[in-house]
Amino acid sequence: MNTETLQIDLAQKIFNIWDENLLQKINSLISSDDIVGYSANGTPIAAEEYIKEMDEMNAEIDNGTAELLTTDEVRKNIANAYGLD
């Protein structure tokens, strides 16, 4: 298969995909973004987006608006949510 045929074949396959998560993964794969991880639903997280989110979280911590939990509080929340207490 030559390059032009391969391009057309891939374009047709991509055109027939309706799954947004899969399309986002394909987009991330062929884009120049550095992928540093994936969200819980499988959406790729680009380095730029990750850094932006971390900067926002750090700002919330610095100005005292962040909701922070201790390990024990997290355990209690999970136990309560699943009736494990």
Image (cartoon, grey):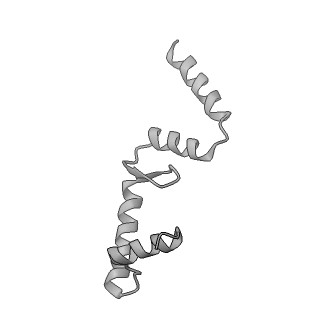
Identify the residue shown where x is 65% and y is 36%. Answer: 17
> Taking 16 as reference, is 37 left or right?
left
Q: Quadrant of residue 32?
A: top left
Identify the residue shown where x is 55% and y is 24%. Answer: 7
Find residue 45 and report its horizontal and vertical position in percent: 43, 53
Find residue 57 and report its horizontal and vertical position in percent: 37, 74
Seen in the picture, residue 33 relative to 11 is either above or below; the reply is below
Identify the residue shown where x is 46% and y is 38%. Answer: 30
> Taking 20 as reference, is 57 left or right?
left
Task: Pick out the residue farthest to the bottom.
Answer: 64
Residue sitting nearer the eye, 44 or 75: 75
Q: Quadrant of residue 5?
A: top right
Task: Pick out the residue farthest to the top.
Answer: 1
Task: Pick out the residue farthest to the front.
Answer: 85
Seen in the picture, residue 68 relative to 34 is either above or below; the reply is below
Seen in the picture, residue 22 relative to 57 is either above or below; the reply is above
Find residue 59 and report its horizontal and vertical position in percent: 35, 79
Number of numbered labels in the structure image: 0
> Taking 7 as reference, is 32 left or right?
left
Residue sitting nearer the eye, 77 or 21: 77
Find residue 79 and report its horizontal and vertical position in percent: 46, 71
